[in-house]
Image (cartoon, rainbow, N blue to C red):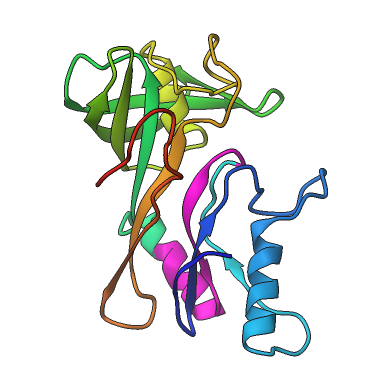
């Protein structure tokens, strides 16, 4: 367990890639269980440990996550997310290089619940999404980009870039030419208003080095 920040109300941790946030049909160890076990042992908590889930990361994606340790914190963090007071930043490696060094991408997305696939559609059938990106580095065929997520739609980053013929490296779901390996997407920074104190909490978690051929520096 790599802890990025903790107090009586929140717990910020590094979520390793390929660990689910919640328990699922695989029965694999999940982040909620790991965090509860950590709190129980560190603070010698009797009985079941309460922990609130306020946001998610796709199973293949690693990086910053925040959990609520009280119901009040869970409610206020959820409200901060709903009102877009929480800032989420990611790094990704694209199969391709964008024409612009930085840009804003806006689309409407729809999810097929049967296939668990997301696609771009029109305003009448989808939910609005927006992100901004900035190129950090290139190697001639790929681009390392820093992404600021304005909305939190399922598979948003993966689909928005894939729809522009720049899918993420090693994205087995949306990249038709994906090579084997870990998807090149990492939740690198998270900022949020503290649920009970008048201060902003910012945590940073860089991906493992080397990461898909790039050294990530912010």
Which residue is depicted at the point 53% across and 30% down? 183
Taking 91 as reference, is 57 above or below it? below
Q: Nearer the viewer, residue 28 or 165?
A: 28
Residue 63 position in % (x across, y down): 47, 50
Taking 28 as reference, is 138 above or below it? above
Visible in this render: residue 136? yes
Taking 74 as reference, is 143 above or below it? above
Going by the picture, which residue comes out furthest to the left? 101
Q: Specify the segment rendered in magenta.
A: 59-79
Q: How many marks?
A: 0
Q: Quadrant of residue 191?
A: bottom left
Residue 102 position in % (x across, y down): 18, 28
Q: Quadrant of residue 207?
A: top left
Which residue is depicted at the point 54% across and 15% down? 178
Q: Which part of the image, by quadrant, shows the N terminus?
A: bottom right
Question: Is residue 207 highlighted in magenta?
Answer: no
Horizontal side, residue 189 vs residue 36: left or right: left
Q: Quadrant of residue 164?
A: top left
Visible in this render: residue 131? no
Horizontal side, residue 130 vs residue 52: left or right: left
Residue 137 position in % (x across, y down): 24, 28
Horizontal side, residue 100 vs residue 90: left or right: left
Residue 148 position in % (x across, y down): 29, 42
Q: Nearer the viewer, residue 106 or 62?
A: 62
Which residue is depicted at the point 69% across and 90% down? 44
Going by the picture, which residue comes out furthest to the front? 210
Taking 154 as reference, is 81 above or below it? below
């Amino acid at each position: 367990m790599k802890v990025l920040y903790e107090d009586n109300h929140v717990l910020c941790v590094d979520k390793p890639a390929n660990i689910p946030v919640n328990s699922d049909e695989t029965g694999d160890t999940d982040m909620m269980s790991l965090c509860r076990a950590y709190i129980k042992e560190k603070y010698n908590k009797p009985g079941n440990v309460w922990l609130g889930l306020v946001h998610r990361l796709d199973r293949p994606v690693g990086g910053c996550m925040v959990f609520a340790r009280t119901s009040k914190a869970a409610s206020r963090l959820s409200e901060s997310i709903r009102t877009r007071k929480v800032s989420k930043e990611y790094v990704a490696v694209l199969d391709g290089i964008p024409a612009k060094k930085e840009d804003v991408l806006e689309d409407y997305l729809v999810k097929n619940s049967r296939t668990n696939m997301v696609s771009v559609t029109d305003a009448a059938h989808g939910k609005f999404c927006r992100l901004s990106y900035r190129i950090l580095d290139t190697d001639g065929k790929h681009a390392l980009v820093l992404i600021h997520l304005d909305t939190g739609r399922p598979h948003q980053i993966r689909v928005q870039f894939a729809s522009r013929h720049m899918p993420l490296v090693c994205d087995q779901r949306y990249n038709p030419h994906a090579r084997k390996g870990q998807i090149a997407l990492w939740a690198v920074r998270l900022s949020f208003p503290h649920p009970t104190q008048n201060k902003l909490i910012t945590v940073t978690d860089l991906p493992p080095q080397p990461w898909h051929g790039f050294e990530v520096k912010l």
